[in-house]
Amino acid sequence: MDFNGNKPIYLQICDSICERVLSGSLKDEDRVSSVREFGAEIGVNPNTVARSYEKLTSDGIIYNRRGIGYFISPGARDKVLQEQRKDFLENEWPLLRKKMELLGLSKEDLK
C-alpha cells in the first residue's frame, strides 16, 4: 500500500478497506485480516491499524466478533456508497466544476 502525506495513514487504511467493499472484493460477513496480520502486510504499526478498525467499527462498516476477529457488516457497501457519494458531491465536485469553468471545459468536452 502506498501512503501519501496529505492524509493520516489510519484514514488511508479506512479508505482502502472501503474501496475493497465498493469493488466487491470484500462482501458482507467476509472476515477482515487481524490487526497484526494487516499491519504486517502493509508495513504499519498494529496500533495504526487498530485505530482504523475502531473508526470503521464506529462507522458501521466492520464489526468485531470477540475472540474471532473483524468482519464486514451487513449493508456496509450501501453505507460506504452513500457516504462517498455525499463526500464527492460536497467536497470534490465543486472543485472539479470550478476547474472546468476556469479551463473552459464543457460537458461535451468530457465525452
Image (cartoon, helix red, strand yellow):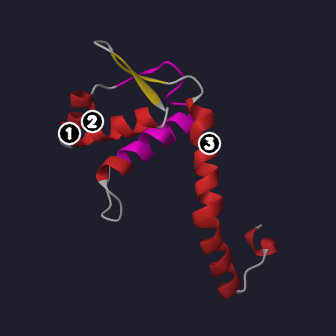
Residue furthest out toward the right: 108
Residue denoted by label 3: 81
Q: Residue 11: x and y, percent?
A: 37, 50
Q: Amino acid at mark 3?
A: Leu
Return the disc, 3 or 2, that comes first in the chain's sequence: 2
Q: Residue 44: x and y, percent?
A: 21, 44
Count of numbered circles in the view: 3
Verify CB contact (< 8 Å) between mark 1 and mark 2. Answer: yes
Question: What residue appears at the point 39 percent right and 40 percent down from the top-left corner?
Answer: 55
**Residue 4 sits in which quadrant?**
bottom left
| Element at label 3 | helix
Question: What residue appears at the point 24 percent right and 43 percent down from the top-left corner?
Answer: 48
Residue denoted by label 2: 50
| Element at label 1 | helix
In the displayed structure image, the side of residue 49 where residue 97 appears, left or right = right
> Is 27 part of what is drawn in magenta?
yes
**Between marks 1 and 2, how big is the CA–CA gap?**
5 Å
Q: Amino acid at mark 1?
A: Asn
- How dense is the environment of label 2, judged by Cα within 10 Å: few (below 14), some, or many (20 and up)? some
- How dense is the environment of label 3, judged by Cα within 10 Å: few (below 14), some, or many (20 and up)? some
Residue denoted by label 1: 47
Q: Amino acid at mark 2?
A: Ala
- Which numbered tag is attached to residue 77? none
Return the disc, 1 or 3, that comes first in the chain's sequence: 1
As drawn, 18 above or below 74: below
**Between marks 3 and 2, how big is the CA–CA gap?**
23 Å
Q: Which residues are magenta?
A: 12-32
